[in-house]
Amino acid sequence: MSARTSRASELDPRCFISLVETLVEDGRIKDEVSIRRMISALYFCLFNYWCAKKYESGIRKGGPLKDLFPYRDFHEELLKKKLDKEIVLLYTLRTASDHYVLNPTIIIIYDKVISRIIPKLRITMSLKALKNAISASKEILKHI
Amino acid sequence: MVRPLTPYSQFQDEYVGEYLSKGPKSTPVRCDRFISNEDFEAFEKREEYIRFFARILETPLRPKPFIPRLFSLRSAFNHVKSLTDNQVHELLLKYIGKDVLGVLKKVRDIDLRKFLALLSWISDDARFTIYGSPLVDAVVDEETNEFQFITIMLPECNADEWGDIVKEIKGEMERAGLVDMVGKVAIVCLQGLQELVS
């Protein structure tokens, strides 16, 4: 990698997303570990790419080299672009993939609702979830 | 039989003030009487045409249902601006739990007045109330323990409706001067999210 190489072009996730899509279409992803790692990687390849674009545009954040960007800024920009469906889906799946062990697992959505049943989100790590994560990632990529 | 309708502007200030000072449950919703001025004019014009053609065809009148809009997001925000901090907090607790409010109060760039206006508007607009009472949550990252965004969840809308609802609500937020809140709030169709993750 030369010093003049663009960080954004080095971290462009197009090839990676395409690779994941091909693996799914070819039936090469069957086990839960692969599904979980792919979902997590989809989220982070977009996040890294977004950070690189911000860095190249002159924005500096934390860390010794000012290249440590918070998740919140990433989410905020996508929500401003009305990509609520895509980022909420990808972030929810990524959180479940990386932090929750059971499959399916349950996330309780808390609220002051007392008289009603507290809503629960039942998340299944499946190929269907991975395919939805790929679609969301492709849509997010168009707006980064 | 069409019920008598009243142009909304005659009652707007009185109704919005009453609604926001007493909360969503205390004021009887008189949806069948209040419509916007534009809708009222369109209604009169439409009724005139319907009656004209109905007389010709000698068919009974069958009025179509209206979707009333009790107040706009902008008028809700204008009213909230005049409330004290205590009033804002008390009203927010009618919509959200203490835990969520506690998280939001620690985030310095969340405008609670704008958030209250947004919640009261969504909770009362028939375009969104058909999806159930909104639920509110504050999303905090599992790793960093940092606040990420607020979610306003509509329980009964599906994945296909989700994108359009987001555009409608966020478009109105931009028009009403709540631009800085657009990136801090995620609109979630709970049924739709459940469809996509199971």
Image: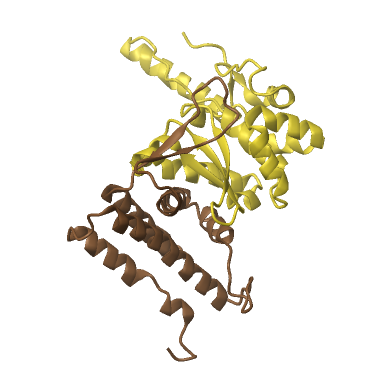
Chain colours: A brown, B yellow
Report whether residue A84 is seen: yes
Residue occupying the point 71% across, 27% down = B20
Quadrant occupied by the N terminus of chain A: bottom left
- Place of residue A88 in the rendered image (x, y in percent of width and height, measured from the top left): 46, 49
Outermost residue, left side = A26
- Place of residue B177 in the rendered image (x, y in percent of width and height, measured from the top left): 66, 48
Residue occupying the point 69% across, 33% down = B92
Please say if B160 is above or below A18: above
Quadrant of residue A77 within the rendered picture: bottom right
Outermost residue, front side = A101
Please say if B58 is above or below A39: above
User: Viewer-proximal residue, B60 or A12?
Assistant: A12
Residue occupying the point 28% across, 48% down = A128
Say whether residue A12 is left or right of residue B104: left
Quadrant of residue B115 within the rendered picture: top right
Quadrant of residue B99 within the rendered picture: top right
Please say if A16 is above or below B120: below
- Place of residue B100 in the rendered image (x, y in percent of width and height, measured from the top left): 64, 38
Report whether residue B161 is seen: no
- Place of residue A122 in the rendered image (x, y in percent of width and height, measured from the top left): 39, 38
Number of labels in the image equals 0
User: Viewer-proximal residue, B156 or A119?
Assistant: A119
